Image (tube, grey):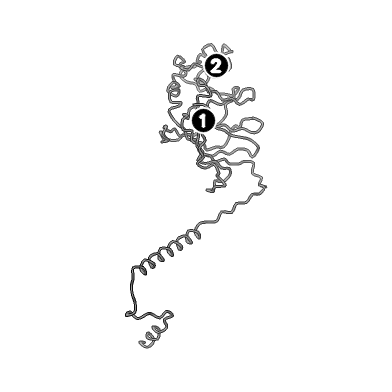
Amino acid sequence: MLDVIEKLRRLDAYPKTPEDFNIKTFGGAAITIISVIIMSMLFWMELLNYLTPNVTEELFVDTSRSPNIKINLDVIMPTISCDFLALDAMDSSGEQHLQIDHNIYKRRLDLDGNPIDDPKKEDITINNKESEIAIINKTECGSCYGAATDPNRCCNTCEDVREAYRERQWAFPSNPENITQCQDEHFNEKLQLAFKQGCQIYGSLIVNRVSGSFHIAPGKSYTINHVHVHDVQPFSSSAFNTSHKIRHLSFGTSIDSVTHNPLKDTYIVATEGK
């Protein structure tokens, strides 16, 4: 057995220099350490490259029969309150998209971008003047304060009163403290916070696979005579600073790729307004 071990020792492909002839220097130690570091880095880089999947992108015509497409978005408006922002979707003819399957949330932020409260799911249905359903509050038939064209009409919410003012083309009071419906809905508090908070709008919505558009804009959105309008009263349109940051915007399945989400972390500064 000892003979076998001795023979194995002699089968050394790299004969060793006798210890008496070895000279250990600082330069040799430095070269050894640097070599080990370089080899470790190369090994780690090759391992990461092996474990990272290769994303191959290809442009082709979508021949699927799916009638819908998914839109993923995450946008921050740092100086406009969520109460004064609306997300709308419509097709190329201007018709509003009703009953959209969506998962859109709004989260209130302070001016530093920190969350104030939990996100709330947003109703992105565009209101139609002829089909609005009033939410009854304490008053069974509230006054429209002289703005109703029909004497039998009831204005049971602050939005009903604003709608009546819009039809009359009257300016809505900048401080509607004398309107009972607005007092019940704390409208004055919302006005005071209009430019003292920010808003994050994020989530996904599924729309028809046709030519169309969606947008985030200040004011209450509605349609009148097939025209899409945003009512920003009691403010003017120039009062809103629409600077915003696009954290995510993609179509279809969300993929973490630069070309799939080219607008990631893009900040747009509005040149008009405040």
User: Mark 2 = which residue?
Assistant: 165
Residue 70, horizontal then vertical, whole percent? 58, 41
Residue 15, horizontal then vertical, whole percent? 40, 81
The extreme bottom residue here reads: 3
> Mark 1 and mark 2: span between their CA atoms?
26 Å
Residue 86, horizontal then vertical, whole percent? 53, 30
Q: Amino acid at mark 1?
A: Thr
Asked where in the image residue 263 lies, by quadrant, the reply is top right
Q: Residue at x 33, y 72 (%)?
A: 24
Q: Residue at x 56, y 18 (%)?
A: 166
Figure check: 189 above or below 147: below
Residue 91, horizontal then vertical, whole percent? 64, 33
Figure check: 266 above or below 177: below
Residue in the foreground of this view, choosing between 22 and 216: 22
Q: Amino acid at mark 2?
A: Tyr
Residue in the foreground of this view, choosing between 197 and 210: 197
Query: How would you rate the neighbour count of disc 1 (Cα within 10 Å): few for under 14, some for 14-19, many for 20 or more?
Result: many
User: Mark 1 = which residue?
Assistant: 242
Element class at badge 2: helix
Q: Residue at x 64, y 40 (%)?
A: 209
Element class at badge 1: loop
The extreme left residue here reads: 20
Query: How would you rate the neighbour count of disc 2 (Cα within 10 Å): few for under 14, some for 14-19, many for 20 or more?
Result: some
Q: Which of the two discs, 1 and 2, labels the residue nearer the N terminus?
A: 2
